[in-house]
Image (spheres, helix red, strand yellow):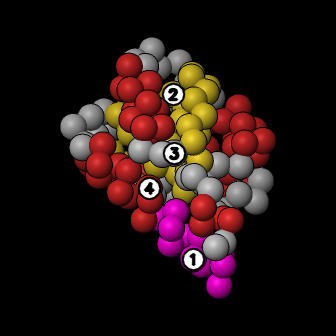
Amino acid sequence: MDVAKERPIKILLAKLGLDIHWRGVVALSRLLRDAGMEVVYLGNQFPEAIAAAVLQESPDVVGLSTLSGNHLTLGPKVVRLLREKGMDDVLVIMGGVIPPEDFPKLKGEGIAEIFGPDTPVRDIVGFIRKRVRDERKETDS
């Protein structure tokens, strides 16, 4: 069996900027861990620090949490920095209180999916598993 398919999905989670609303992302980190994922939680960070951590940790997924209204600037900046560093294959998702009218702009900037506060954890886990599984299949081909 292929070792890459056996290794758990690794996700790096961070709060964007100085957002003090941390309960949701901490709870999610535990739930993702319980779903069999390897979770690295950075706490509050700015895009440059998040990109540096991604370079060091090599996660499959970066999850950005926001509640303070900085999603339109800091989220896309993380994606840009990752792409500039050649990390095009890292899936970037975002969660928190984000107005639905901002979803198209965020997706246009490279955020793969946005999850609101009422999103069932099984939907988040399912999305991550499917996208990472598909990416691993493409890499193996």
Question: Is 134 inside the magenta-drawn segment?
Answer: yes
The answer to which of 119 and 76 lies nearer the viewer is 119
Q: Residue at x 78, y 41 (%)?
A: 56
Badge 3 is on which residue?
37
Q: Position of residue 75 (x, y in %)?
A: 52, 42
Horizontal relation, residue 42 to residue 71: left or right? right
**Sequence-first disc among 3 and 2:** 2
Badge 4 is on which residue?
128
Q: Residue at x 66, y 36 (%)?
A: 50
Tell me the kind of residue under disc 1. Answer: Lys
Q: Quadrant of the C terminus?
A: bottom right
Whether residues under marks 3 and 4 lie with C-beta atoms below 8 angstroms apart, the answer is yes
Give the structural element (helix, strand or loop) at label 4.
helix
Q: Residue at x 74, y 55 (%)?
A: 84
- Give the class, few, some or many, for how many residues have Cα within 10 Å of label 4's Cα (few <14, many ≥20): many
Res 130 quadrant in image: bottom left
